[in-house]
Image: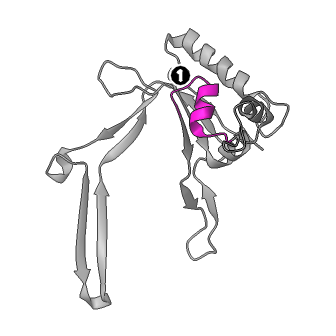
């Protein structure tokens, strides 16, 4: 596909085509789109998206491409934007921040509720017994007088796992 940063690209048709492909291969239609922040920034300014929302604009209601509107264009339940950042610099070097989601997009079927017999592109698993209770998160806070500060430690026992690669399509560099 053409990168969506190219004004002649066709992101709506691209997503529709990939949804049909996944449906044809699995019998299940993708219901969500996960976008890196850079992808979202380009997509909301894409001529195909803007042309579809212009008609609904008025002086008191400007044409703004919201995640809900974009999800409707793609006929999806959800559009999620990855806004997390990371410092990729080596230790003791100047910070080099970048978005974890990069320039990627993931079209995927995400089950509305987890179930042993319900397919999904992925699930988040929690190990509840490890921390001695029913929660997979434990937070400890204690005072360190030697350095005159409080310390907060969080321990979490969760893991995200791909369940079915057939229920999703990853676009690695969807924008320039």
**Image position of 27 with respect to 88: above or below:** above
Q: Is residue 34 visible?
A: no
Q: Left or right of 30: which side holds 5? A: right
Residue at 66% x, 20% y: name it: 16
Residue 163, picture quadrant: top left
Residue at 71% x, 33% y: name it: 53
Of 20 and 154, which appears nearest the observer?
20
Disc 1 packing (10 Å; few <14; some 14–19; many ≥20):
many
Give the tally of numbered discs: 1
Residue at 21% x, 48% y: name it: 135
Residue 73, picture quadrant: top right
Q: Left or right of 105: which side holds 154? A: left
Q: Left or right of 8: which side holds 172? A: left
Q: Left or right of 26: which side holds 14? A: right
Q: Is residue 104 visible?
A: yes
**Image position of 165 with respect to 158: above or below:** above
Q: Position of residue 167 (x, y in %)?
A: 51, 22
Read off the magenta span.
Answer: 64-78
Which residue in the protein does label 1 denote? 30
Residue 104, picture quadrant: top right
- The quarter in which the N terminus is drawn is top right
Of 171 and 43, which appears nearest the observer?
43
Of 15 and 122, which appears nearest the observer?
15
How has the structure been colored for display?
one colour
Q: Is residue 65 magenta?
A: yes
Q: Position of residue 51 (x, y in %)?
A: 78, 31
SS of the residue under disc 1: loop
Q: Is residue 75 magenta?
A: yes
Q: Position of residue 48 (x, y in %)?
A: 77, 30
Q: Position of residue 62 (x, y in %)?
A: 70, 43
């Amino acid at each position: 596909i053409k990168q969506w940063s190219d004004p002649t690209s066709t992101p709506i048709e691209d997503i529709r085509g990939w949804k049909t492909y996944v449906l044809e291969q699995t019998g299940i239609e993708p219901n969500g789109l996960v976008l890196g922040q850079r992808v979202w920034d380009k997509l909301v300014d894409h001529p195909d998206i803007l042309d579809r929302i212009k008609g609904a604009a008025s002086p008191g209601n400007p044409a703004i491409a919201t995640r809900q509107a974009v999800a409707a264009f793609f006929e999806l339940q959800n559009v999620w934007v990855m806004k997390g950042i990371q410092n990729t610099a080596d230790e003791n070097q100047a910070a080099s921040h970048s978005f974890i989601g990069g320039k990627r997009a993931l079209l995927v079927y995400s089950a509305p509720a987890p179930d042993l017999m319900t397919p999904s592109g992925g699930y988040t698993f929690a190990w509840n017994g490890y921390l001695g209770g029913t929660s997979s998160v434990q937070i400890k806070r204690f005072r360190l007088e030697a350095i005159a500060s409080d310390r907060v430690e969080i321990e979490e026992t969760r893991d995200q796992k791909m369940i079915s690669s057939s229920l999703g399509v990853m676009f690695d560099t969807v924008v320039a």
